[in-house]
Image: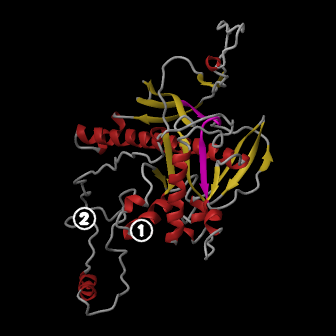
Amino acid sequence: MKVTQIQDIVNSSLKELNGTSDLLNEDLSNVVDVGTEIFDTDNVDNFVKKLIDRVGQTVFNSRLYQGSAPSVLMTSWEFGSVLEKVDSELPDVEENDSWDLQDGKDYSPNIFYQPKVSAKFFNSKVTFDIPISFTQTQVKSAFNTPSELNGFLSMIMNGVQNAMTVHLDGLIMKTINNMTATVLDSNTGLQVVNLLDGYNQNATTKLTPENALQNTDFIKYTNLVINTYRDRISKMSTLFNQGQKSKFTPMANQHLVILSDLASSSKVYLESDTYHDENVQISDFDTVPYWQGSGEHYNFDDVSSIDVAIKNGKATKEVKASGILGVLFDTNAVGVTCQNQRVTTNYNPRAEFYTNFTKFDAGYYNDLNENFIVFTVQQPTQSTGTTGTTGTTSN
């Protein structure tokens, strides 16, 4: 074992801690062990210099990742593949003849009034698998007990599950981002709400997207607008979906997802200084640290942006947008269906190892006939036409 004398560093640290010295430059290269992948020549005893150091304790980094993407999972099923969604149109009203009876007029009730019903079918699926191989005989020499070996194998399996969770989170966010891009591209009805434009129309101080979330008045306005739209979509309207269908989304069926930058700003700049903070805050929402990615520095322009290709007939169209603060949608607008996660195993008797194939397939869908609203602080960038296919999400 390599042992380093650090009395000088310890003595100088006391002066920093008790206030008798300014901060000093400290060389910690010989103090903090950052670990090595393999043993080197220093890993022998300090007596006869020949005995290899033993492992006193083995710690497996086996933390299970919980995931953070908003849950849009729908009821799964075992057989079949097509998701059918059936809607009925609102029937028209007619004159009530009971109050306008005329002598000799026929009031026959034998008229067939066919209900107006429409159906949408979703029948696409994506799939992937994660292969990982295991051995026991070949790796036993590295451990002292069966429990240590089992801990090692459990760590590997947890790693597979963590990878699965990360990838599923990514697919869920892609499904939401596809719907967001589609709404921003068409910009019909009241589906796109530019919070900054609305605020700046009456504000004495004009804000930019970069400094808006540090302004208490803007955050108040943002929370006001979001809460107002939550009430608006609970009433029957055609203004909040692409298909201009008469839809309503009660509070219990609303899904609000906001950028964590907005949620944190609301707590720090607004709710912390407000006695009755329940009157100014938004509630019942999920947060995401970014929509598509963090970039290298978690800049607001990166975390609030999407750059995706969406379906445009048989081709695709690229949509770039930044400044997205949140989305509010019906639970039936975005979904993951027909999930099927399973593990298949193959054993190789000659090489004495087995391989697990962790497989997953599911359908990811957007229903443009359901209510979906995007809250933003910037106008979407002009989209461009491309060719090809979109990949994971079907409209």
Instruction: Tell me the quadrant of the picture where the C terminus can be found.
Output: top right
Provide residue 129's location: percent of width, then percent of height: 52, 33
Residue ID at (40%, 35%): 134
Check disc 1 and give the amino acid type.
Val
Provide residue 269's location: percent of width, then percent of height: 44, 70
Identify the main secondary structure in magenta: strand
Residue 230 in view in this figure: yes
Provide residue 356's location: percent of width, then percent of height: 44, 30
Question: Mark 1 highlights which residue?
Answer: 268
Instruction: Tell me the quadrant of the picture where the N terminus can be found.
Output: bottom left
Is 116 placed above or below 264 here?
above
Task: Give whichever of discs 2 and 1 has the lower sequence position.
Answer: 2
CB within 8 Å, label 2 to label 1: no
Query: In the visual, does 250 lie left or right of 136?
Result: right
Is 111 placed above or below 260 here?
above
Foreground label between 2 and 1: 1
Kindly state the secondary structure of the residue where label 2 is placed.
loop
Kindly state the secondary structure of the residue where label 1 is placed.
helix
Provide residue 90's location: percent of width, then percent of height: 63, 27
Query: In the visual, does 67 lie left or right of 366?
Result: left
Q: Residue furthest left?
A: 47
Q: Count the marks.
A: 2
Query: In the visual, does 224 lie left or right of 319?
Result: left
> Which of these two is toward me, 21 or 125?
125
Residues in magenta, as a range: 361-376
Q: Residue furthest bottom?
A: 20
As drawn, the label of residue 49 is 2
Residue 36 in view in this figure: no
Is 55 placed above or below 143 here?
below
